[in-house]
Image (tube, rainbow, N blue to C red):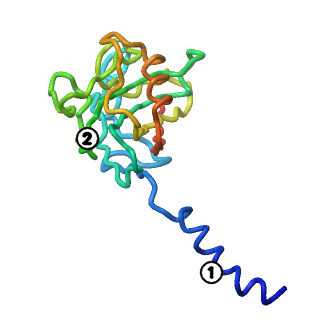
Amino acid sequence: MHNTLKYLSPLLLIVSLPIFADSLTLSSGDIAQGKFMDKKHEFNGFGCSGEDLSPHLKWSDAPKGTKSFAITAYDPDAPTGSGWWHWQVVNIPATINELLTNAGSVKENLAPKGSLQILNDYGKRGFGGACPPVGNGVHHYRFTVHALSVEKLELPEDASGALAGYMINANTIESSVIQSLYKRD
């Protein structure tokens, strides 16, 4: 038995190498995993008074076959029965690997050329910041980059968050998430 393991060890290492390959990684200069977001990422409206700035996001190690990217920001804790879409950007060219702070502002026009910002659940195009109900506890905001297998998602200009989410998930090769927190007392 001992001799068999001696010969299998190099083979096991070769077989397990793909497990250690780089995978899509999302990072940010503004938000961090499991940490509370600043007020600058709070919505301005619905009783909230933040700056409504989308966070800086940067990604690396896209998988082979990536033809475009999508970014989503979703709050599963919103008391709606279906969560809350804060931001969805699709058709980000595969050559892009970073969105600057406030890229979600349609007024500033900082989103990558050719991308499409879907209507958020506030009924506005672009980013809509955190605004959980007062006293509703901690909400978890999932900022996700999706590496897509298609260059462009064919979506109507007025696509719902659910339709965009369906198309994103149907074409995702790999994704990476930063889950940030926010609450209002």
Residue 99 circle label? 2
**Residue at the (47%, 34%) spot, across then down:** 141
Amino acid under disc 1: Pro
Identify the mark nearer the N-term, 2 or 1.
1
Q: Residues within 10 Å of mark 1 (few under 14, many from 20)?
A: few
Residue occupying the far left of the picture:
108
Residue 14 in the image, given as x and y percentages of width and height: 58, 72
**Residue 4 placement, left or right of 183:** right
Q: Which mark is residue 10?
A: 1
Determine the residue positioned at 33% across, 16% down: 45
Assess disc 2: are there few (<14), some (14-19) or many (≥20) residues with their C-alpha within 10 Å of its C-alpha. many
**Number of marks in the rendered image:** 2
Mark 2 residue type: Leu
**In the image, farthest residue toward the bottom:** 3
- Image position, residue 183 (x, y; %): 48, 32
Above or below — where is 78 with respect to 55? above
- Above or below, comparing residue 8 to residue 71 in the picture: below
Where residue 138 appears, x then y in whole percent?
54, 34
